[in-house]
Amino acid sequence: AQSVTQLDSHVSVSEGTPVLLRCNYSSSYSPSLFWYVQHPNKGLQLLLKYTSAATLVKGINGFEAEFKKSETSFHLTKPSAHMSDAAEYFCVVSLTGGGNKLTFGTGTQLKVEL
Amino acid sequence: GAVVSQHPSRVICKSGTSVKIECRSLDFQATTMFWYRQFPKQSLMLMATSNEGSKATYEQGVEKDKFLINHASLTLSTLTVTSAHPEDSSFYICSADYVTGGIQTQYFGPGTRLLVL
């Protein structure tokens, strides 16, 4: 079985400061990990994905995430937050080679203040 | 590339009527598409996996006779909510499996907001 835990339901940062959204996963097999972003009343947009290549993954809009197997973590970071980053972020896991059924975290609401 | 569209974006219907939602992969072929439901301020709940040319696989607790899924081509899957009731009001999101370099990634549509009166 696989699962994802997003440790913070809400994160608030000031514009221009770093962003850290935490994610821990549990998987019996080699996982693929994703971060998706959802703006209000919109579908999900893929930010980045880890699929057993480089452990530091760079995504769109300046986001990146590091896969740490020893800590079973895949935290999402950005050096400098922008107002347009305010949205809901989902950490997602799927089993590599096990079909593409996704397991979603509960989401983290990112608020960016002036 | 890897764009998924949904139609309609929002629909209001009367209780007891049926509503069809379309999901299209615009620039790639998708053997597998997925249908999700999302309640306000909650995560996505997988309803069913739709495979082109075969019957959909429904998640536990999802009524297959109420949520009819058809995946007749490699670029189109439809979800029909039959005899809709107010409790079916929700945000429905589809995704399509995009395979490149042996890696599968789901790309999501923009969602359909259903309101049943």
Image (cartoon, coloured by chain):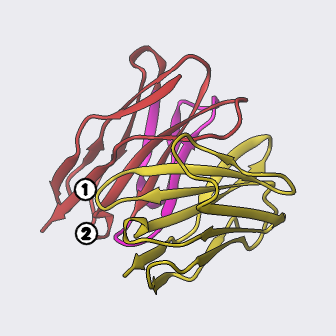
Chain colours: A red, B yellow
Residue drawn at x 43%, y 66% as measured from the top left: B88
User: Mark 2 sits on what residue?
Assistant: A83
Q: Position of residue B71 (x, y in %)?
A: 78, 63
The N terminus of chain B lies in quadrant: bottom right
Query: Mark 1 or mark 2, which is nearer to you?
Result: 1
Q: Position of residue B86 (x, y in %)?
A: 37, 71
Q: Which residues are magenta?
A: A39-67
Q: In this view of the protein, which residue sits in the foreground, B81 or A1?
A: B81
Q: Is residue B5 visible?
A: yes
Residue drawn at x 40%, y 48% as measured from the top left: A90
Image-based side of A72 in relation to A15, left or right: right
Residue drawn at x 59%, y 57% as measured from the top left: B35
Badge 1 marks a residue whose secondary structure is strand
Say which label, 1 or 2, has the lower sequence index. Answer: 2
Q: Quadrant of residue A72?
A: top left
Which three-letter amino acid code belongs to the residue tagged 1? Leu
Residue drawn at x 26%, y 54% as measured from the top left: A109
Tell me the distance, in whole angstroms, between the alpha carbons under discs 1 and 2. 10 Å
Image-based side of A46 in relation to A68, left or right: right
Badge 2 marks a residue whose secondary structure is helix
User: Mark 1 sits on what residue?
Assistant: A110
Q: In this view of the protein, which residue sits in the foreground, B95 or A14?
A: B95
Magenta region includes residue A60: yes
Magenta region includes residue B16: no
Q: Position of residue A3 (x, y in %)?
A: 45, 29
Mark 1 nearby-residue class (10 Å; few <14, some 14–19, many ≥20): many
